[in-house]
Image (cartoon, rainbow, N blue to C red):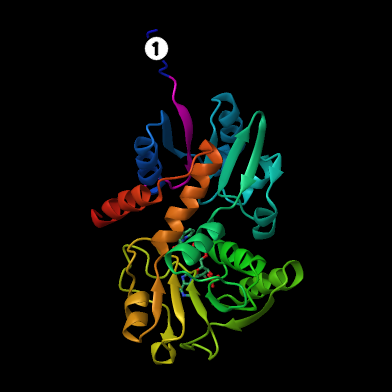
Amino acid sequence: MPKEPNYKAELVGVFGHPVAENPTIVMQEAAFRALDLNWRYLTIEVYPEDLAAAMQGLRAFNMRGINLTIPHKISVLNYLDEISTAAQLIGAVNTVVRKGDRLVGENTDGKGFMQSLRLDAGIDPAGKRVLVLGAGGAARAITVEVAMAGAAQITVVNRQPARGQALVDLLNQKTPVEASFIPWDGTLAVPGGIDLLVNATSIGLFPNVDHKPDLDYATIHPGVTICDVIPNPPQTSLLSRARARGARTLDGLGMLVYQGAIGFKLWTGLDAPVQVMRQALEEAFSAT
Ligand code: NDP
């Protein structure tokens, strides 16, 4: 029997503003090609005042789901029918799955970090003492997941004390971890007894590739694993300096790939071709 043509693609994508430099299309389209799926990932500029209409459009176009990036990760909570426990704690959603007429929100950022930690670095966060630089969206997602995975202790270091303290209060009240705050008001000496140090600030992101967190690098010891959320460039100044001190390192590209792989699975129901996705992003970033 000749096969009937089917020209209709399944649609997913990202809503953001600005959104033109969002690289997620590169890894998702590479994954669709690798698995021979007739799916498309659309990079869509949505102004803040248009988010309600855009979310309704998701239903109208029968899209399978959407990613949210700046400035929509928090405001999208108003337009969802269901929100995962972790996303509720984090207070932000970066991935929506359409299930019939229902829109279900998840946050895959912290989960992506956890998978990279486990699979790329071979580290289980249970029982670990973790120091996190930053208290924005990435820091919230990472600390909530690490706390729920059984970390022993989380220290949040942030420039704006109110933001850092708010994150510590959330962790102490809503998760089993013991959290504390250190204000970041000068060069920070890395406290002894830390197992993991995570840079969850935007310091070092392309094009500011020479920027690095204000740390006393002489206090980084070989027993600490230094993780960066910055995906581009994967090898940040922080990670180079940490390696020079004998520390193990984990780049932010893995987190970006795994958070996308989790979204891919939520949308398609299929295991994502993680290596294909990572390679596609590496090629895209090396061309910038
Ligand atoms: P936010 O704007 O929510 O938070 C930024 C954080 O960085 C704040 O804690 C801010 O401190 C801190 N910060 C920024 N500049 C400085 C500085 N010069 N000195 C000290 N602290 C600074 O951003 P997000 O949390 O959403 O994103 C942070 C980074 O994480 C981005 O670069 C993003 O690309 C990356 N990211 C990576 C992902 C991945 O998959 N690899 C996923 C999500 C994000 P303060 O509160 O004091 O202003």
Which residue is rendered at x = 40% and y = 7% of the image?
1
Of residues 77 and 107, the one nearer the viewer is 107
Give the farthest residue toward the left.
287
Hey, which quadrant is residue 50 in on the image? top right
**Spot occupied by residue 88 in the image (x, y as percentages of width and height):** 69, 54
**Spot occupied by residue 269 in the image (x, y as percentages of width and height):** 54, 38
Q: Which residue has dot 1 on it?
A: 3
Residue 26 on the magenta span: no
Q: Secondary structure at mark 1?
A: loop
Residue 116, relative to residue 194: is it above or below? Answer: above
**Spot occupied by residue 123 in the image (x, y as percentages of width and height):** 50, 71
Q: Which residues are magenta?
A: 8-20
Q: Amino acid at mark 1?
A: Lys
Of residues 263 and 23, the one nearer the viewer is 263
Of residues 257 and 102, the one nearer the viewer is 257
**Spot occupied by residue 16 in the image (x, y as percentages of width and height):** 48, 45
Which residue is rendered at x = 56% and y = 78% of the image?
130
Q: Is residue 38 left or right of residue 267?
A: left
Give the farthest residue toward the top.
1
Of residues 32 and 183, the one nearer the viewer is 32
Residue 29, relative to residue 174: is it above or below? Answer: above
Which residue is rendered at x = 59% and y = 52% of the image?
107
Residue 149, relative to residue 85: is it above or below? Answer: below
Hey, which quadrant is residue 256 in on the image? bottom left
Hey, which quadrant is residue 82 in on the image? top right
Query: Can the viewer see residue 158 in this picture?
Result: no
Q: Is residue 210 left or right of residue 125?
A: left
Give the farthest residue toward the front.
1
Which residue is rendered at x = 47% and y = 28% of the image?
10
What crowding class fits label 1: few (fewer than 14 Cα within 10 Å), some (14-19), or many (20 or more)? few
